[in-house]
Amino acid sequence: MNLARLALAVLLGGALVALGFACSNEPGGDGRRGGPVTTITAPEDAIGEELMLALSQAKNFHHKARVYMSDGQLAPATESVRKILAIEFPAGAPEAEDVRLDARAMLAKLLVAQGTVDAAMSVVDEGLASATRESFFVANLYTVKGEVLQAQAELLVATGQPGDAERAREVRKQAIVAFDKSIAINEALQKRILGEP
């Protein structure tokens, strides 16, 4: 069990709590896969209270935003997501980057829904610039970048100004590049997880 997996479980509302024990399906001493084996969590895999509190806050703001969104209240939903970005995480916690990238993806979608497409692109670009490693969350942010670019292209077409149709085609090409980047990151991560070269 590692911190990123535990953080993801916490973010997704999982009921996993590190209480000093973790279950794994490790090969038995004879090389066969056995049933679950209880092992003591290694100190480097233990999650501190400060990090748990930060993750809990992020989860609550995320849920609060979802409730506002389900009621069509996009402005308070946006404010809840912005509060996730302001949470203080322990220094060096990789979960902080993941939480912030996830929040930026959600914030960008909310901004597009409110018609502030340029602001949405700024949120995405800031997130991508801050990323220190490839992850599912970076890939997702590239997907959202593609969606924002699609929205920009639609706005260009809607204006009907001279040259906007050609500009919209160029923006759509940028969207494809963003989607391809997301696909490439996810494929690389899958290969790494599966131990493929």
Image (cartoon, helix red, strand yellow):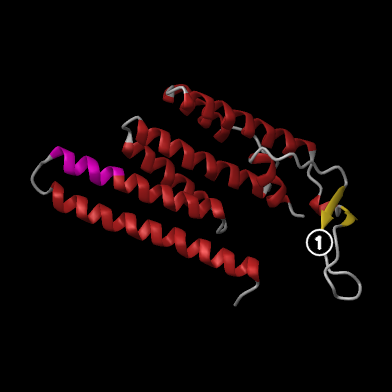
Residue 115: quarter of image: top left
Residue 112: quarter of image: top left
Residue placed under numbered mark 1 in the picture? 25
Q: Residue at x 63, y 43 (%)?
A: 96
The residue type indicated by label 1 comes to Asn
**Which quadrant of the figure contains the C terminus?**
bottom right
* Mark 1 nearby-residue class (10 Å; few <14, some 14–19, many ≥20): few
Under tag 1, what secondary structure? loop
Query: In the figure, 161 relative to 35: above or below?
Result: above
**Front in this rendered view, residue 63 or 56:** 63
Q: Residue at x 52, y 66 (%)?
A: 187
Query: Farthest front residue?
Result: 35
Query: In the figure, 66 relative to 40: above or below?
Result: above
The image position of residue 117, as x and y in percent, is: 32, 38
The image position of residue 8, as x and y in percent, is: 66, 46
Q: Is residue 67 left or right of residue 48?
A: left
Q: Is residue 94 magenta?
A: no
The image position of residue 163, as x and y in percent, is: 11, 49
User: Magenta span: helix, strand or loop, mainly?
Assistant: helix
Q: Residue at x 52, y 31 (%)?
A: 81
Q: How many marks?
A: 1
**Bounds of the magenta segment:** 151-159
Query: In the figure, 161 relative to 191: above or below?
Result: above
Query: Farthest bottom residue?
Result: 197
**Front in this rendered view, residue 163 or 157:** 157
Q: Is residue 172 left or right of residue 128?
A: left
Q: Is residue 117 left or right of residue 144?
A: left
**Which quadrant of the figure contains the N terminus?**
bottom right
Q: Residue at x 39, y 49 (%)?
A: 145
Q: Is residue 40 left or right of residue 99?
A: right
